[in-house]
Image (cartoon, rainbow, N blue to C red):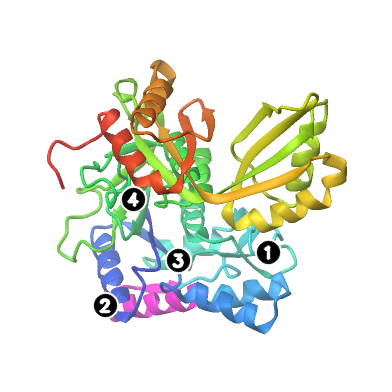
């Protein structure tokens, strides 16, 4: 008997017929003798609708009440799936975040899971019931409902798998796995059988939309084996453990890791570039730029410092999420006197292109290949950032798809047969 957590996203739960299809898939796992817990998202578009209600009610809404409202979407789908399972002859019940409970921090709208009480759930699983759990929600120390932030149902599923000591956490989405790049841009992209936690964490952080970054980090920390599968393969498709999508695993499970130079290429157009001109070139000047951004909880990615034409001054360029551009400008202008910059220039017509692979640790020339390939196509690099297994560049947004295609070919990632 295996213990499996199955997580279904919003497109999988978009309507009663799809919920019945999910119930049929869960029933097959139960019939195979497995203990199953299911984590569900709200119906596609429902969370956006609920967020809209909050904003319409008040632009300065209470985050605690916001969480009460937006968590309702998952409550609805968990109840509906439990009903559909019962109608299919499968013992099931729903468990809301506060009923287990799933304990979280009190950072409303972006809470972090601190622990899950498994006592009641263990009794339910032992009795043969399928536990249907709403993702995205928990409860803080004061008994208030909390939510984990957008995409938080992935994190809920991984946390539940860790607490249950599950054999596997299957994430069902509208794609059938993790590809070497976006197949909509590169039809010859290949589906990967296995990806390391570290690679998936980098891919998720630089634009790959398959899994939420926090869920991958938690899976790596807890050693949870995660599988990405499509929920639209039909009821007669083979079982998940016989026809896997992409497994997210530890490095020890990938035997040919060193022979694989690059695992994937990601792109992200949700970047904004900020340049501060004529910043005083003295100790502490750069710190004065990023302190107000940190205080505003704004993440900074790429950073470049150049010596300006005027003696004793420098230009500093960096990127922030496009959604945080307005707050970044406000924070920097508020600290303008302390920073001492002359002007602030921003640009949202940029994109970040990243190549990721653990093979970089043992192979030289990855960055050189990237830079020369882009240069040959006349694509100018505006900024660069690196990690042990990633190289990212900032380019003009209009060149995004061309950059992804030529790099995919340059690193030998194209499939032999066109899709």
Q: Label 2 to label 1, Cα distance in Å?
A: 37 Å
Q: What residue appears at the point 70 percent right and 52 percent down from the top-left corner? A: 328
Is the residue under label 2 in contact with that under label 3 (CB below 8 Å)?
no
**Callout 4 touching callout 3 (CB < 8 Å):** no
Q: Residue furthest left?
A: 417
In this rendering, is residue 317 above or below 332?
above
- Residue 400 in which image quadrant: top left
Q: Residue at x 40, y 42 (%)?
A: 266
Numbered tag placed on residue 124 in the rendering: 3
- Residue 91 sits above or below residue 153 on the image: below
Magenta part of the chain: 74-93
Establish if 364 lies above or below 239.
above
Residue 211 pos. (x, y %): 43, 51
- N-terminal of the pair, mark 4 or mark 3, is 3
Categorize mark 2 by other alpha carbons within 10 Å: few (<14), some (14-19), many (20+): few
Q: Nearer the N terminus, badge 3 or badge 2?
A: 2
Q: Nearer the viewer, residue 351 or 232?
A: 351
Of the two numbered discs 1 and 4 on the same chain, state the one appearing first in sequence: 1
Query: Gap in Å between the C-alphas at discs 1 and 4?
Result: 28 Å
- Front: mark 1 or 3: 1
Badge 3: how crowded within 10 Å, few (<14), some, or many (20+)?
some
Q: Earlier in the sequence, mark 4 or mark 2?
A: 2
Position of residue 384 in the picture relative to residue 296 (left or right):
left
Which one is in front in this view, the residue at disc 3 or the one at disc 2? 2
CA separation, marks 4 and 2? 25 Å
In the picture, the disc for residue 228 is 4
Residue 372: give x, y in percent of width and height.
37, 24
Q: Horizontal and vertical percent for residue 390? A: 46, 31
Does 106 sit left or right of 242 as displayed? right
Q: Secondary structure at mark 4?
A: strand
Which residue is label 2 attached to? 88
Judge whether residue 275 is colored magenta: no
């Amino acid at each position: 008997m295996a213990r499996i957590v199955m997580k279904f996203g919003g497109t999988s739960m978009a309507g009663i017929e799809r919920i019945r299809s999910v119930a049929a898939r869960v029933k097959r796992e139960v019939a195979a003798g497995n203990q199953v817990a299911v984590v569900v998202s709200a119906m596609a578009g429902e969370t956006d609708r609920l967020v809209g209600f909050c904003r319409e009610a008040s632009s300065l809404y209470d985050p605690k009440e916001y969480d009460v409202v937006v968590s309702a979407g998952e409550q609805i789908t968990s109840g509906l799936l439990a009903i559909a399972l019962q109608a299919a002859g499968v013992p099931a019940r729903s468990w809301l975040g506060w009923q287990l409970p799933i304990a979280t921090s009190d950072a409303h709208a972006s809470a972090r899971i601190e622990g899950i009480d498994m006592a009641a759930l263990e009794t339910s699983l032992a009795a043969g019931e399928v536990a249907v759990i709403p993702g995205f929600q928990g409860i803080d120390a004061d008994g208030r409902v909390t939510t984990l932030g957008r995409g938080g149902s992935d994190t809920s599923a991984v946390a539940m798998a860790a607490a249950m000591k599950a054999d596997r956490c299957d994430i069902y989405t509208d794609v059938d796995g993790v590809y070497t790049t976006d197949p909509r841009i590169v039809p010859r992209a290949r589906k990967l059988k296995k990806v390391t936690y570290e690679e998936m964490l980098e891919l998720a952080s630089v634009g790959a939309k398959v899994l939420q970054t926090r869920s991958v980090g938690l899976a790596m920390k807890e050693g949870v084996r995660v599988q990405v599968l499509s929920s639209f393969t039909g009821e007669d498709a083979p079982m998940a453990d016989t026809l896997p999508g992409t497994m997210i695993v530890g490095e020890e499970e990938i035997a040919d890791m060193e022979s694989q130079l690059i695992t994937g290429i990601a792109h992200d157009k949700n970047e904004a570039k900020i340049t501060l001109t004529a910043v005083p070139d003295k100790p502490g000047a750069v710190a004065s730029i990023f302190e107000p951004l940190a205080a505003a909880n704004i993440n900074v990615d790429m950073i470049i410092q150049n010596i300006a034409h005027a003696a004793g001054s420098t230009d500093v360029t960096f990127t922030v999420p496009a959604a945080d551009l307005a707050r970044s400008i406000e924070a920097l202008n508020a600290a303008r006197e302390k920073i001492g910059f002359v002007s602030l220039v921003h640009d949202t017509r940029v994109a970040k292109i990243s190549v990721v692979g653990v093979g970089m640790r043992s192979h030289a020339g990855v960055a050189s290949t990237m830079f020369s390939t882009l240069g040959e196509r006349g694509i100018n690099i505006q900024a660069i950032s690196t990690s042990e297994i990633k190289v990212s560049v900032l380019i003009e947004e209009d060149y995004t798809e061309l950059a992804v295609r030529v790099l995919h070919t340059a690193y030998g990632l194209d499939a032999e047969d066109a899709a």
